[in-house]
Image (cartoon, helix red, strand yellow):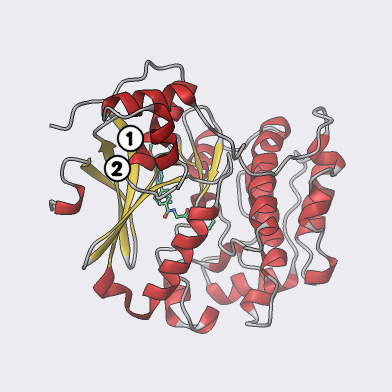
Amino acid sequence: VRYNALKGLYDLEKTIGCGGFAKVKLATHLATGEKVAIKIMDKQMLGEDLRRVKLELEALKSFSHENICQLHQIIETETHFFIIMEYCSGGELFDHIVEKNRLTEGESRMFFRQIVSAVAYLHSLGYAHRDLKPENVLLDKSQNLKLIDFGLCAKPQGGIESPLYTSCGSPTYAAPELILGQQYLGQEVDVWAMGVLLYALLAGSLPFDDLNIDNLYRKILNGKYEEPSFISKDSLSLIRSMLQVEPSKRIKVTELLDHHWITLGILEPVQYQARSSSMYDSDCVQIMAKFIDIDEKMMWNELSKWKFDYNTATYFLLSNKKKRGHSLKLNQAP
Ligand SMILES: COc1cccc(Nc2ncc(-c3ccc(C(=O)NCC(=O)Nc4ccccc4)cc3)c(OCC3CCNCC3)n2)c1
């Protein structure tokens, strides 16, 4: 299917993900030749979730963090939203773990520190992720983690008991209070899911798993899981502090930042501040200014409005290209 809104800007390629209300396609940003992921959402199918999608887009615009998948551009038409996102060429963390069977404590620590950084950043902005799982943690070409919220199931309004929830993703990572449909704090639900993630990294399997959903619920509410002998005592005690059935007993994200397991061998607490906001890259601004024959100051004046238009996408993709040591050039529109 060809979309007029993308004509001359992006070339759509294969579909890399799909779910209820949207599909994600790999695409090429024509001016730079760089790959992007475009989430195409059909407005008619969104119904009352349209409001929630608009809220997510506002949130996405405010995120600027090394370990959160970067929004590049939003294109809205009568019938669709096109959300142009950073493409993570390393795929899903889930596949990476499966491929290596399980990770060493050192590898797990490098990945888990990045997850703690991204979640602490989200919480510092007052957001909770609520759907942390290996499928929503992607890798870029240099093994940096990128958190996404693939909530294609558009988190059902009705909460966990609504049919959508059970169909859209097994609650393998869901905290006990979520399963019980109790009042819950997003931050505490995220810590539980991070415990499941850390277990998956170190064990190469899931702490709570069962094909029968009632058995799965029982195991989660019981909070008991296998402690493989190849996982160190230190790692097991950190996991235990996150997989506490009683939410108030769970370790806080702020306590994770300088936890001794997190800093072991690195001696640095986890930094979670936003990407340097002054990410002014004059080489990229100059190239973009020259391309449309205006001066650098005028170009930056336009870019610093962060409109998430084609210029915003071009700027992000050029600066990524430069960071990877590639030559900077822009292609004439065909
Ligand atoms: C190489 O092989 C592979 C194999 C697989 C993937 C890739 N790469 C690859 N890169 C980028 C994406 C992507 C990024 C963001 C969004 C999004 O919707 N963001 C919105 C968003 O992140 N909100 C948000 C973030 C943080 C907090 C709150 C809200 C959507 C898609 C992708 O998708 C494909 C799916 C497939 C099913 N599992 C999940 C990923 N895939 C590559």
Query: Residue placed at 67% from the left, 37% from the top?
Result: 108
Q: Quadrant of the C terminus?
A: top left
The residue beneath circle 2 is: 26
User: Along the horizontal axis of the image, is 65 left or right of 19?
Assistant: right
Label count reads 2
Q: Secondary structure under badge 2?
A: strand
Spot occupied by residue 4 in the image (x, y as percentages of width and height): 14, 52
In front here: 196 or 46? Answer: 46
Q: Contact, CB < 8 Å: mark 1 with mark 2?
A: yes
Amino acid on which disc 1 is placed: Lys
The answer to whether the residue bearing label 2 lies less than 8 angstroms from the nearest atom of ligand 1 is yes
Label whose residue precedes the other's in the sequence (1 or 2): 2
Spot occupied by residue 277 in the image (x, y as percentages of width and height): 59, 40
Query: Residue placed at 45% from the left, 29% from the top?
Result: 320
User: Along the horizontal axis of the image, is 42 left or right of 54?
Assistant: left
Spot occupied by residue 205 in the image (x, y as percentages of width and height): 61, 49
Is residue 280 visible in the rendered image? The answer is: yes
User: Along the horizontal axis of the image, is 104 left or right of 33?
Assistant: right
Query: Residue placed at 67% from the left, 82% from the top?
Result: 182
Q: Secondary structure under badge 1?
A: strand
Residues under labels 1 and 2: Cα distance? 7 Å
The residue beneath circle 1 is: 35
In front here: 76 or 12? Answer: 76
